[in-house]
């Protein structure tokens, strides 16, 4: 069976007699069509033999794979017939740490679904130019620890757009952008993942107009130690709907997201230059917005270049509501003891915005490094003064944070 | 014994194979025989100028055995470079045949040939692919998309074993052999990896130039009993050698696993990067509920051991080229971690 035969004409690989229309219909330029029934070998062969500036078009239906797929050709577009019409299913995958691995530059995928990978669904490593559009990733059995870790997973990429996608059930993060630069994550829906959307060790990210709900944590921005690309900075999180992220944390322990308290709306962890504005954040059991250093994780940091203290965090003009009285997991102990210090006779109500209060002992903080909180209606605040037993006193005084930072510039993609 | 699950030969449909040539650049030729590497493919009898070599510590490949060969372009030599890499000139071909012995206790009982991988040094760098043996042992056919082959054999302990052996596709070759931006590189032939008697044979054949005197060669480290060679070196050297061979082709600062921050190459001296008290990054179920890649003195609390001991696709390490657990390798790394002092308390 040959899959090739390219040129000006599109070629349809019709294994089963076609009942659908030509998957390449309407595609300009060179296109390889793959109809339902195409085997894993057929698809992988197409992914190897595809020439640059071509499209691989999947027809309607479900395509099943026993091993992972990979693409290392530049300027390739993969399309399906819609995120509910074309499904790449990895339910029976026997080998491979992800469903589809992409290492070719200038990659686009759209209008397709990837389901039930044992590991990550779509991983893109070192790709310059990523466009993931109207793509669905789902673990169809609902949130489970045995689901794969990441849904959409660009790492060490540049110029990344994730737009109009739906990701459900990831046991780590639905949308995870790691160690990357120039990132736009917009108009997506993340549901029933541990972390809905996560920006990690990345620089220049705009996360906007997304809906993140029913995850353990809605949107996370953080930095981890010990990586090739670290101390990510400049993230804008704006005009998102972040609500009811109260799914019990189902991450396998040992992972950093396993520490995210169930019921977290937005968290900035060891993050730098983050502007959180114009979001609707509500109804979280633990905390609506958290700003935390890496220190309370208790994990060792054997990395002299890593800055584990958050700096320049601006939280302004959000609509924050739905105060909790039942924080969970690690944060619970912190909050209960801190609030107990302030209000020994109750009532026990968790403030909307919490900061662990940990400062870098070796840094002289300037106005530009501060955590600034303004214009968030009646959202209240707590400085948790972690760890409590070292003399610092928890405080609900928001006045030290009544400041504004210079607005961050938006991300300009080429 | 072997059975074919799916292995679509990519030849046929009118391809005229009789006149194919195997240029060092461009598309790979369709048949292994077209490379003229063997006088007898079924017996793996190399042709003149095709030199066998072997490694001190081989990469584990699901208990497959390997025959390795180098062919240099006519009239040219490989060069021993100062940093110990054997520099192979453009036109060189590296050949590796994967087989299953019928009975690992007695190689004379024969073996099933599964695949031969051919890595070619072209003008624009290395490229390669695998050739699959079907029912015929006399030739193998190009299989750029890989395959799964069911195999069975009698193991070292006399037990009957089976495997769904995965022949890698062309991208997966790159996944292990490539550094950043897909520069394909050979994995094996650093001088310190090649068995000294084979190095000597290369020198004697006039194939390897600039080699220092034999008494200045790096001490070979044999991690485990292998092909009649008993282990050499300290426990630390043997474990690091095993990790170097089995993990560092991805886990190095330029490899596919560079994003993990875990570097297992022989030259890495920062133990935090080798995994000591290192928290996992994007590990998912691979963490096994454990906190650190290496927890000193506690192999059962170390993610490296957990992942080496798993056969699940999203957990196991290495990701590629292994379905089965390398029991001897796991035992070695367990012993190494078990002997470490200290703790990861912050």
Image: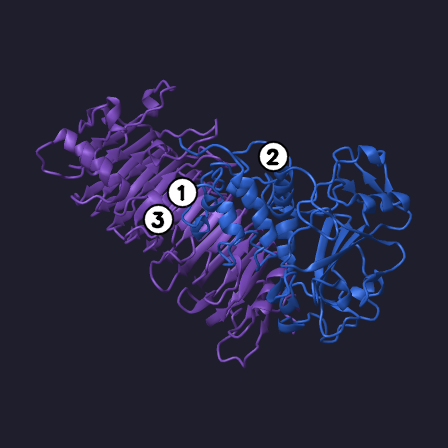
Chain colours: A purple, B blue
Specify few, some or many for label 1: CA neighbours under 10 Å numbering under 14, 14-19, or 20 or more.
many
Q: A244 or B273: which is nearer to us?
A: B273
Question: Tag 3, which chain?
Answer: A
Structural distance between the alpha carbons of marks 2 and 3: 33 Å
Q: Residue at x 9, y 36 (%)?
A: A346
The numbered disc on residue A199 is 1
Res A358 → quadrant: top left
Where in the figure is residue A97, as x and y percent of width and height? 51, 55
Question: Tag 2, which chain?
Answer: B
Say if B158 sits above or below B268 in the image: below
Structural distance between the alpha carbons of marks 1 and 3: 10 Å
1 and 3 marks in contact (CB < 8 Å): no
The answer to whether residue B85 is left or right of residue A367 is: right
Q: Residue at x 23, y 43 (%)?
A: A286
Res A81 → quadrant: bottom left
Q: Residue at x 57, y 76 (%)?
A: A14
The numbered disc on residue A195 is 3
Q: Secondary structure at mark 3?
A: strand
Q: Closer to the observer: label 2 or label 3?
A: 2
Name the residue tied to disc 2: B268
1 and 2 marks in contact (CB < 8 Å): no
Are the residues under badges 1 and 3 in a single subunit?
A: yes
């Amino acid at each position: 069976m040959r899959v090739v035969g390219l040129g000006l004409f599109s070629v349809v690989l019709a294994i089963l007699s076609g009942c659908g229309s030509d998957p390449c219909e309407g595609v300009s330029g060179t296109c390889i069509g793959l109809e339902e029934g195409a085997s894993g070998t057929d698809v992988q062969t197409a992914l190897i033999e595809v020439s640059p500036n071509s499209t691989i078009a999947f027809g309607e239906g479900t395509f099943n794979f026993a091993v992972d797929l990979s693409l290392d050709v530049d300027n390739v577009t993969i399309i399906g017939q819609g995120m509910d019409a074309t499904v790449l299913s990895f339910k029976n995958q026997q080998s491979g740490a992800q469903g589809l691995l992409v290492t070719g530059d200038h990659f686009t995928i759209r209008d397709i679904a990837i389901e039930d990978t044992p590991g990550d669904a779509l991983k893109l490593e070192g790709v310059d130019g990523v466009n993931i559009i109207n793509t669905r990733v789902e673990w169809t059995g609902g949130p489970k620890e045995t689901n794969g870790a990441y849904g959409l997973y660009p790492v060490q990429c540049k110029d990344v757009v994730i737009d109009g996608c739906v990701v459900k059930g990831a046991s780590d993060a639905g949308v995870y952008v790691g160690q990357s630069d120039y990132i736009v994550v917009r108009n997506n829906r993340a549901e029933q993942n541990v972390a809905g959307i996560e920006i990690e060790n990345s620089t220049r990210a705009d996360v906007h107009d997304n809906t993140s709900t029913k995850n353990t944590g809605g949107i996370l921005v953080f930095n981890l130690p010990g990586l090739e690309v670290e101390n990510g900075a400049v993230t804008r999180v704006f005009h998102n709907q972040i609500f009811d992220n109260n799914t019990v944390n189902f991450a396998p322990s040992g992972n950093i997201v396993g520490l995210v308290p169930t019921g977290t709306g937005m968290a900035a962890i060891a993050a730098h230059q983050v502007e959180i504005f114009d979001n609707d954040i509500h109804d979280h059991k633990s905390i609506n917005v958290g700003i935390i250093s890496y220190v309370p994780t208790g994990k060792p940091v054997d990395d002299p270049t890593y800055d584990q203290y958050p700096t320049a965090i601006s939280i302004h003009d959000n609509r924050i509501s739905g105060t909790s009285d039942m924080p969970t997991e690690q944060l619970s102990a912190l909050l209960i003891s801190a609030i107990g210090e302030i209000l020994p006779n109750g009532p026990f109500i968790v403030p909307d915005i919490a900061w662990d209060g940990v400062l870098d002992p070796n840094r002289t903080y300037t106005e530009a490094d501060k955590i600034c909180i303004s214009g968030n209606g009646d959202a209240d605040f707590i400085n948790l003064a972690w760890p409590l037993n070292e003399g610092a006193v928890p405080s609900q005084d928001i006045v030290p944070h009544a400041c504004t930072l210079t607005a961050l510039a938006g991300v300009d993609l080429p | 014994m072997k059975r074919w699950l799916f292995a679509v030969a990519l030849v046929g449909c009118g391809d005229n194979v009789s006149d194919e040539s195997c240029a060092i650049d461009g598309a790979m030729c369709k048949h292994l025989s077209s490379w003229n590497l063997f006088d007898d493919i079924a017996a793996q009898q190399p042709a003149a100028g095709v030199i066998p070599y072997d490694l001190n510590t081989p990469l584990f490949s699901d208990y497959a055995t390997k025959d390795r060969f180098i062919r240099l372009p006519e009239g040219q030599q490989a060069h021993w470079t100062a940093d110990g890499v054997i520099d192979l000139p453009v036109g060189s071909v590296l050949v590796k045949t994967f087989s299953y012995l019928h009975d690992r206790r007695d190689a004379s009982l024969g073996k099933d040939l599964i695949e031969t991988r051919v890595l070619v040094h072209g003008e624009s760098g290395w490229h390669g692919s695998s050739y699959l043996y079907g029912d015929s042992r006399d030739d193998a056919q190009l299989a750029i998309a890989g395959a799964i082959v069911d195999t069975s054999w009698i193991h070292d302990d006399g037990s009957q074993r089976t495997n769904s052996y995965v022949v890698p596709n062309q991208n997966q070759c790159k996944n292990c052999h490539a550094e950043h931006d897909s520069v394909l590189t050979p994995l094996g032939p650093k001088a310190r990896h090649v068995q000294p008697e084979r190095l000597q044979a290369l020198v004697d054949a006039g194939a390897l130039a600039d080699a220092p005197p034999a008494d200045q060669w790096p001490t070979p480290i044999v991690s485990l009993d292998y092909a009649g060679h008993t282990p050499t070196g300290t426990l630390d050297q043997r474990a690091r050698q095993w990790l170097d061979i089995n993990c560092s082709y991805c886990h190095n600062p330029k490899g596919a696993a560079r994003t993990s921050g875990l570097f297992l190459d022989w030259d890495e001296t920062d133990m935090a990067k080798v995994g000591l008290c290192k928290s996992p990054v994007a590990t998912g179920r691979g963490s096994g509920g454990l906190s650190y890649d290496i927890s000193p003195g506690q192999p059962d609390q170390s993610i490296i051991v957990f992942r080496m001991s798993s056969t699940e696709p999203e957990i196991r390490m290495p990701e590629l080229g292994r379905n089965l657990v390398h029991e001897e390798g796991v035992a070695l790394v367990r012993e190494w971690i078990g002997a470490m002092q200290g703790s990861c308390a912050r």
